[in-house]
Image: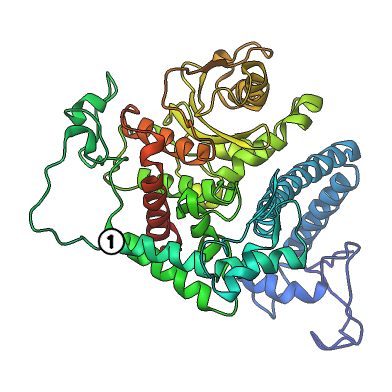
Amino acid sequence: MASSSGTKKYPPRLYEIGKTPIQSRSMNHSCLLSNLQAMKESVGEDEESHTDMPIINNIIQKLVEAVDNLSGRVETMDVSVAERVIKTLEASVQAQVEARMALFETEMKNKMAILEEDMNVLKGKDEEKVTSNAGNFKAHEDDDACSNTMLNDQSISTEGWENHLKWQKSVKCRVALEALASSLEEPTRKRKTKLTKTQVFPYVGNSTVKRIVSGKTVSKESYDPLDKVAPEKLKKVLDFIKSDLEDAESGYGDRSARFYLTLLLPREAWPTKNYGWLHDSHMAAAMHMFHRRSMQSQSPFCSPRIAFPDRWFVNSWVNDYKKFGETNELPEYFSMAFNGEYPAEFVTGKKWLKDVDSLFLCHHVNGDHWVALHINLQKQVIHVYDSIRTWVPDKKMQEECMPFTKMLPALLNKMVDPKLRTKPDKQFTYRRYKKIPQNDDPGDCGLYTLKYIECLALGYNFVGLSDQIIPAMRLKMAAEIYDEVAMED
């Protein structure tokens, strides 16, 4: 009750301000009465004055009501909405985790493929014996030990592997390397012999201008893909091979003597019929080299709108075709590759269709044969360049190309504007060329495939490409991969 004087009277305090033994709280758990002092100071009140106490009580009451009101709203929030938000977030996180795991799994598969290839380099389709030539000449003891031993390409036994290592360190292998090294030395002549047109290496006609594909404009930094290897580059790779063979433990991949011996040894020096057949690791290294050239500030290729997909990515692409046929869904790394963001070593930042019209890639078919593919994204056509047309029938080749003819339309429909999408069942057109240089002495389809790709990317035709110059192209490819890929990594 108010007094007659108009001021309120309060009973005396039992404790001094701030000295109460119990920290008093209001009905709302988050509002402490001990904080009144701070509130009073914030509104400029006199600590000793009690005349403004009703104002303070009013402020506190409003704060309590606001907090209670807020608490009530939180407690009555629609639980279903919260659950939907949580489920959406969980689904998004799960999708990202699965995508990352898929990329990790793909990269691990690729790395395992490299390791498996290194362990299975002796595998092939024919069992052969490297027979001894002891009847013609007396061979070195370690050469005899290898030449009379079965080199079974189907076996990966310890004995077979040891036989291969013996051959690498044998006299025959060293003689072959010395012959290659001696080719770097220019023989002294009393007078320089004048060669005819057909004797000039490589013979490409009267002018290299005739080799430019009609309608193409070659780069100022263009080079002759069929020219001889630079002697200094060949010397580097030969020195590396000798050094690696002398080491107790050989390297692996493009840092091993085996990798380059397979690539550069001439046919007559092969210990088995398929010794010089190129593997995934060779094709991957060459495509990596082409990719790096395309990313130079002054690219040697005829257009900046081309790309060289990673060989291991292409391998995964083919392997995922069966799963795609069951689900019609593409792994996340396809979208990343479309945007020029995958794999890490092949990042370009160029998006297919927007920045890239043509894809050049090497495709392994029939389990034993390489072909080159030129994929025109704008015209939706896949061009097949095959150096041994009689090896795989046309119907079989079309089946081998289905991972691209069928999966590419699905990828484009996923990535492009909905207005530009095509029918789900539409496929890319398939074309296989007939009148191109052929590998008449089979065994070099890998080299032909790489040369097809290189010539097309430069804007050249294939005039001059033949079995006659393939040994020299092997030297050139090995030396350039070592110089531009292995030494740069």
Q: Quadrant of residue 451?
A: top left
Q: Is residue 394 above or below residue 349?
A: above
Q: Residue furthest front?
A: 135
Residue 6, visible in the rendered structure: no
Amino acid identity at mark 1: Leu
Q: Residues within 10 Å of mark 1 (few under 14, many from 20)?
A: some
Picture coordinates of residue 297, whole percent (x, y): 29, 47
Looking at this view, is 374 or 376 the one in front? 374
Q: Which residue is mark 1?
A: 184
Q: Is residue 167 above or below residue 431?
A: below
- Seen at 54% across and 74% down, the residue is 140
From the viewer's perspective, tell me whether residue 431 is left or right of residue 221. Answer: right
- Seen at 88% across and 38% down, the residue is 78
From the viewer's perspective, tell me whether residue 57 is left or right of residue 236. Answer: right
Residue 344, visible in the rendered structure: yes
Looking at this view, is 79 or 57 the one in front? 79
- Seen at 40% across and 46% down, the residue is 471
Picture coordinates of residue 100, whole percent (x, y): 70, 49
Q: Quadrant of residue 464?
A: top left
Looking at this view, is 322 or 37 the one in front? 322
The N terminus is located in which quarter?
A: bottom right
Picture coordinates of residue 70, whole percent (x, y): 81, 49
- Total labels: the figure holds 1
Q: What is the secondary structure assignment of the residue under circle 1?
A: loop
Q: Is residue 187 above or below residue 140?
A: above
From the viewer's perspective, tell me whether residue 423 is left or right of residue 472. Answer: right
Q: Is residue 198 above or below residue 51?
A: above
Looking at this view, is 17 or 370 the one in front? 370
Picture coordinates of residue 415, whole percent (x, y): 58, 27
Which scheme is used to colour this image of the protein? Answer: rainbow
- Seen at 28% across and 59% down, the residue is 231
